[in-house]
Amino acid sequence: MTPDWARSVWGTVRSRTGRLLQRIRHARHPLVGLTKWVVIVAEGTAGFILLFAVANLVLSLSTFRGEDPLKRTAHELGVLWFSTPDGQPTSERAFEVIHGQTLGDDPDTAEIRAHFEAAARGGTFLLDQIMVDRMEAVNGRVDAAVLPPGVYVGAHALGPDKPPLVWVTKWLAHYVLFPRHAYILVVPETGPAWAFSASQEGKFPGETDSPNRLTARITPYTDAAYDFPSSGEALHEMTIVSDDPAVVAGALARLTRARDELEALDQPYGLLAPNSNTVVGCILEEAGLISAEVRRSTLLALRAPGIGAACPGEDETP
């Protein structure tokens, strides 16, 4: 039998819940007329934005976390904490704190490359601003001496790099604004690494008459590259899609053709489609590096809007 005290508590809870529901059911909005509806619309908009942010936070903390999500999250938080705006060196303690346990305080090029050879065997790994700074410090540039030769796809949040906004937006962009910007990184056997970046023409340096046109650039993977790790974009999730020497050797020529074909289309950039991630996905599909099903997958489309859109010559996206 249920104890008397339990029945009493349950009765009190039911009574108070009933009174609260009655008050809500018969409540009248304190405002009237146009002001009332302005407040209601504002409250609804704020609620929708909050719901969107919470959903994206859950996705950011639960998607592509690997076998040790807590270690991955700690790594991300540390990198974001130490990341610096363009032109400012990172703290001398940054590398020791973020990578010291794995690589020691002062790894050479061979040790860094061995680290990424092991990481790349898992398919996906993080390349962060702290590590790239160290690569440049010990090697002068990003190339095959510090990163295994291959064709990679990088994905990162987009955010401003200048204070004061960067100190807030870099956290929001990585965890609350879930969609990611994708680019292609080619690391040849010899010479510097190259980045294929697609975006709105107005976001690249130089004057333009069509700032909203979808366009692409192929540049050395240096501080001047559109997709080089920086404070607002400090964490890059890299996926190796091919380490075949023949594919790597022909990648730049293939990407140059893709860039020229994109220029000839003269099409506007779209958030949902087509956009920069559509371009990257279509290039990888055409090269046989990913399947059409993977490119169109719901998760990829959610993570990077546009990647599931139809490629040139396709009638529609299933």
Image (cartoon, rainbow, N blue to C red):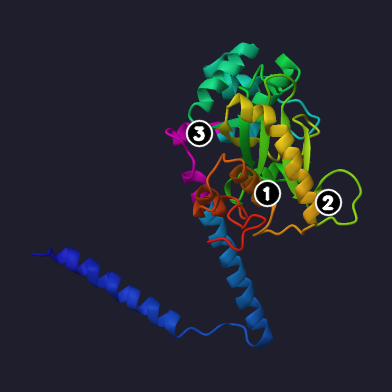
Q: Which residue is mark 2?
A: 202
Q: Quadrant of residue 16?
A: bottom left
Q: Are marks 2 and 3 in contact (CB under 8 Å)?
A: no
Residue 279: assigned label: 1
Mark 3 burial class by Cα count in 10 Å: few <14, some 14-19, many 20+: some
Disc 3 from disc 1: Cα separation? 29 Å
Q: Is residue 3 above or below residue 28?
A: above
Task: Please report the residue visible at 57 percent of the width from the left and 66 percent of the height from the top.
Answer: 48
Sequence order check, earlier mark of 2 and 1:
2
Residue 72: assigned label: 3
SS for tag 3?
Answer: helix
Mark 2 burial class by Cα count in 10 Å: few <14, some 14-19, many 20+: some
Is residue 89 something that shows in the picture?
A: yes
Q: Is residue 172 above or below residue 274?
A: above
SS for tag 2?
Answer: helix
Task: Please report the residue visible at 67 percent of the width from the left and 43 percent of the height from the top.
Answer: 170
Q: Are marks 2 and 1 in contact (CB under 8 Å)?
A: no
SS for tag 1?
Answer: helix
Residue 67 painted magenta? yes
Q: Amino acid at mark 3?
A: Arg
